[in-house]
Amino acid sequence: QVQLVESGGGFVQAGGSLRLSCAASGRTFSGYAVGWFRQAPGKEREIVSAISWSGSNTYYADSVKGRFTISRDNAENTVYLQMNSLNSEDTAVYYCAANRVYSTNWYGRTTRDYPYWGQGTQVTVSS
């Protein structure tokens, strides 16, 4: 079973940037599709971005398209989420999630697609 640890969250002013990291331990990240989700107070957890095992396929929610970039380094067992042009609506707890897959191009878009979750990292954007 893979364990996930997020890092890189914090407090930033509107227009600023942060890079989140999702590190896997327990076993290699190779073979896992990974998604980034976020949950703001009083709201449901929502997909932000996802990446296939190979890294060749990616997905972005409309709200972050053009501002966020997901990438992965399987040799380092880490997936990244570069977040630029942040605004107050990006304030949330960000979670990474993973699923062991056998398709190099698959990624999931819902919370039910991922059995493994990190503990989350808080991102706060001041306006």
Image (cartoon, rainbow, N blue to C red):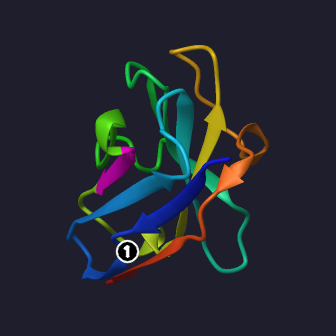
Q: Residue furthest right?
A: 112
97 on left or right of 126: right
Q: What secondary structure is marked by label 1?
A: loop
Secondary structure mainly formed by the magenta segment: strand
**In the rendered view, would you say 127 is above or below 60?**
below
Q: Residue at x 74, y 37 (%)?
A: 113
Q: Quadrant of the C terminus?
A: bottom left
* Image quarter of residue 23: bottom left
Q: Residue furthest front?
A: 26
* Image quarter of residue 21: bottom left
Stretch in magenta: 77-82
Q: Position of residue 14 (x, y in %)?
A: 26, 76
At label 1, counting other C-alpha atoms closer than 10 Å, the crowd grade (few under 14, some 14-19, many 20 or more) is some
Q: Position of residue 72 (x, y in %)?
A: 34, 38
- Is 81 in the magenta? yes
Q: Position of residue 48 (x, y in %)?
A: 51, 49
Along the line of sight, the residue nearer the viewer: 25 or 102? 25
Instruction: Tell me the residue that label 1 is attached to.
Output: 9
- Is 6 in the magenta? no
Q: Position of residue 35 (x, y in %)?
A: 55, 44
Q: Amino acid at mark 1?
A: Gly
Along the line of sight, the residue nearer the viewer: 113 or 101? 101
**In the rendered view, would you say 10 is above or below 98?**
below
Q: Residue at x 63, y 16 (%)?
A: 102
